[in-house]
Image: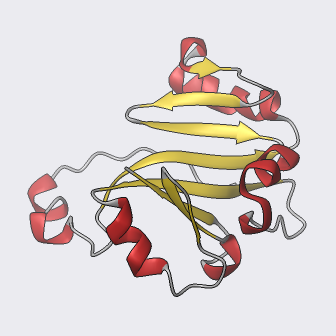
Amino acid sequence: MGRVYFCEHLTPDLVWRPEWQTHPNGAGTIARVVVATSDPGGTAQLFRSLFGNDAIAEPYGRRVIAAGSAQIELAPRNTITAEFGEAAADPAGRAQHMAALEIKVRSLRDAGELVCALSGVRVEARRVIVPAAAVFNTTIVFSE
Protein backbone atom coordinates (compact mmCIF):
# COMPACT_ATOMS: atom_id res chain seq x y z
CA MET A 1 0.00 0.00 0.00
CA GLY A 2 3.03 2.22 0.11
CA ARG A 3 5.54 3.10 2.76
CA VAL A 4 4.98 5.13 5.89
CA TYR A 5 8.00 6.81 7.39
CA PHE A 6 8.99 9.98 9.16
CA CYS A 7 12.06 12.05 8.61
CA GLU A 8 13.46 15.25 10.00
CA HIS A 9 15.33 17.61 7.72
CA LEU A 10 18.33 18.91 9.63
CA THR A 11 19.04 21.27 6.73
CA PRO A 12 15.56 22.51 5.72
CA ASP A 13 17.07 25.43 3.82
CA LEU A 14 18.58 22.89 1.41
CA VAL A 15 15.35 20.87 1.05
CA TRP A 16 12.41 23.29 1.25
CA ARG A 17 13.48 25.77 -1.41
CA PRO A 18 10.81 28.09 -2.83
CA GLU A 19 11.91 27.50 -6.43
CA TRP A 20 11.17 23.78 -5.94
CA GLN A 21 7.79 24.30 -4.31
CA THR A 22 5.75 25.31 -7.34
CA HIS A 23 4.25 23.22 -10.10
CA PRO A 24 2.34 24.25 -13.22
CA ASN A 25 -0.73 22.37 -11.95
CA GLY A 26 -0.85 24.60 -8.85
CA ALA A 27 -0.33 21.73 -6.41
CA GLY A 28 0.01 22.91 -2.83
CA THR A 29 -0.59 20.09 -0.37
CA ILE A 30 -1.69 16.50 -0.15
CA ALA A 31 -5.28 16.45 1.08
CA ARG A 32 -6.03 12.72 1.11
CA VAL A 33 -4.34 9.38 0.56
CA VAL A 34 -6.75 6.51 -0.15
CA VAL A 35 -5.62 2.94 0.50
CA ALA A 36 -7.66 -0.02 -0.71
CA THR A 37 -7.79 -2.83 1.84
CA SER A 38 -10.15 -5.73 2.47
CA ASP A 39 -9.79 -5.10 6.23
CA PRO A 40 -9.86 -1.35 7.02
CA GLY A 41 -10.01 -2.03 10.77
CA GLY A 42 -7.02 -4.33 10.75
CA THR A 43 -5.00 -2.02 8.52
CA ALA A 44 -5.88 0.89 10.83
CA GLN A 45 -4.03 -0.84 13.68
CA LEU A 46 -0.72 0.18 12.10
CA PHE A 47 -1.80 3.81 12.10
CA ARG A 48 -3.16 3.68 15.67
CA SER A 49 0.36 3.19 16.96
CA LEU A 50 1.55 6.20 14.92
CA PHE A 51 -1.31 8.68 15.39
CA GLY A 52 -3.25 7.39 18.44
CA ASN A 53 -6.80 6.09 18.81
CA ASP A 54 -8.39 9.54 18.74
CA ALA A 55 -6.99 10.25 15.28
CA ILE A 56 -9.07 7.49 13.65
CA ALA A 57 -12.71 7.94 12.66
CA GLU A 58 -14.92 5.17 11.28
CA PRO A 59 -17.46 6.57 8.81
CA TYR A 60 -19.36 4.19 6.51
CA GLY A 61 -17.02 1.18 6.75
CA ARG A 62 -13.93 3.27 6.11
CA ARG A 63 -11.20 4.25 8.54
CA VAL A 64 -10.09 7.86 8.24
CA ILE A 65 -6.90 8.93 9.97
CA ALA A 66 -6.13 12.58 10.64
CA ALA A 67 -2.49 13.18 9.68
CA GLY A 68 -1.84 16.88 10.01
CA SER A 69 -3.64 18.75 7.24
CA ALA A 70 -4.10 15.53 5.27
CA GLN A 71 -6.13 12.42 5.88
CA ILE A 72 -5.37 8.79 5.23
CA GLU A 73 -8.44 6.85 4.22
CA LEU A 74 -8.58 3.04 4.41
CA ALA A 75 -11.49 1.55 2.50
CA PRO A 76 -12.63 -1.67 0.85
CA ARG A 77 -12.10 -1.86 -2.89
CA ASN A 78 -15.84 -1.79 -3.67
CA THR A 79 -16.18 1.52 -1.80
CA ILE A 80 -13.33 3.02 -3.80
CA THR A 81 -14.77 1.71 -7.07
CA ALA A 82 -18.14 3.25 -6.14
CA GLU A 83 -16.46 6.63 -5.72
CA PHE A 84 -14.15 6.60 -8.75
CA GLY A 85 -15.79 4.14 -11.18
CA GLU A 86 -13.67 3.50 -14.27
CA ALA A 87 -11.00 5.86 -12.89
CA ALA A 88 -10.25 3.50 -9.97
CA ALA A 89 -6.86 1.81 -9.68
CA ASP A 90 -6.40 -1.83 -10.62
CA PRO A 91 -5.38 -3.89 -7.55
CA ALA A 92 -3.06 -5.97 -9.79
CA GLY A 93 -3.40 -8.94 -7.45
CA ARG A 94 -2.54 -6.96 -4.32
CA ALA A 95 -4.58 -7.27 -1.11
CA GLN A 96 -3.74 -3.67 -0.23
CA HIS A 97 -2.64 -0.85 -2.47
CA MET A 98 -2.57 2.90 -2.75
CA ALA A 99 -5.74 3.64 -4.66
CA ALA A 100 -5.90 7.43 -4.87
CA LEU A 101 -4.07 10.61 -4.03
CA GLU A 102 -5.93 13.90 -3.61
CA ILE A 103 -3.94 17.09 -4.10
CA LYS A 104 -5.10 20.59 -3.22
CA VAL A 105 -4.45 23.07 -6.02
CA ARG A 106 -4.68 26.85 -6.32
CA SER A 107 -7.08 26.68 -9.26
CA LEU A 108 -9.18 23.68 -10.17
CA ARG A 109 -9.80 25.15 -13.61
CA ASP A 110 -6.08 25.56 -14.31
CA ALA A 111 -5.26 22.05 -13.08
CA GLY A 112 -8.08 20.63 -15.20
CA GLU A 113 -6.78 22.37 -18.31
CA LEU A 114 -3.34 20.83 -17.80
CA VAL A 115 -4.65 17.25 -17.61
CA CYS A 116 -7.67 17.43 -19.93
CA ALA A 117 -5.78 15.73 -22.78
CA LEU A 118 -5.38 12.53 -20.74
CA SER A 119 -7.88 9.83 -21.59
CA GLY A 120 -10.80 9.53 -19.18
CA VAL A 121 -10.26 12.71 -17.15
CA ARG A 122 -13.47 13.64 -15.35
CA VAL A 123 -14.16 17.25 -14.41
CA GLU A 124 -16.69 17.62 -11.61
CA ALA A 125 -17.95 20.68 -9.75
CA ARG A 126 -15.45 20.38 -6.89
CA ARG A 127 -12.71 18.14 -8.25
CA VAL A 128 -10.89 16.84 -11.31
CA ILE A 129 -10.30 13.08 -11.41
CA VAL A 130 -7.43 11.63 -13.43
CA PRO A 131 -7.94 7.90 -13.97
CA ALA A 132 -5.38 5.52 -12.52
CA ALA A 133 -4.83 3.95 -15.96
CA ALA A 134 -3.39 7.27 -17.17
CA VAL A 135 -1.02 7.88 -14.23
CA PHE A 136 0.89 4.87 -12.90
CA ASN A 137 -2.16 3.04 -11.47
CA THR A 138 -3.14 5.51 -8.75
CA THR A 139 -6.19 7.74 -9.22
CA ILE A 140 -5.21 11.40 -8.90
CA VAL A 141 -7.80 13.85 -7.62
CA PHE A 142 -7.31 17.62 -7.78
CA SER A 143 -9.42 19.79 -5.47
CA GLU A 144 -9.32 23.36 -4.15
Q: Position of residue 86 (x, y in %)?
A: 78, 67
Q: Position of residue 29 (x, y in %)?
A: 34, 51
Which residue is drawn at the image coordinates 57% and 29% (left, top)? 65
Tally the numbered discs.
Answer: 0
95 or 122, nearer to the observer: 122
Q: In the figure, residue 8 lies in which quadrant?
A: top left
Which residue is drawn at the image coordinates 27% and 57% (left, top)? 106
* Residue 110 vertical placement versus 41 (above, below): below
Identity of the residue furthest to the top in this view: 54
Residue 86 visible to an observer of this rendering: yes
* Residue 37 vertical placement versus 55 (above, below): below
104 or 45, nearer to the observer: 104
Please state if 107 lies on the left or on the right of 121 as rendered: left
Which residue is drawn at the image coordinates 36% and 47% (left, top)? 7
User: Quadrant of the image for the N terminus?
Assistant: bottom right
75 or 7, nearer to the observer: 75
Residue 2 visible to an observer of this rendering: no
Q: Position of residue 27 (x, y in %)?
A: 33, 61
Please state if 33 lies on the left or on the right of 90 as rendered: left
Q: Position of residue 84 (x, y in %)?
A: 72, 57
Q: In the figure, residue 38 lies in which quadrant?
A: top right
Please state if 34 lies on the left or on the right of 32 as rendered: right
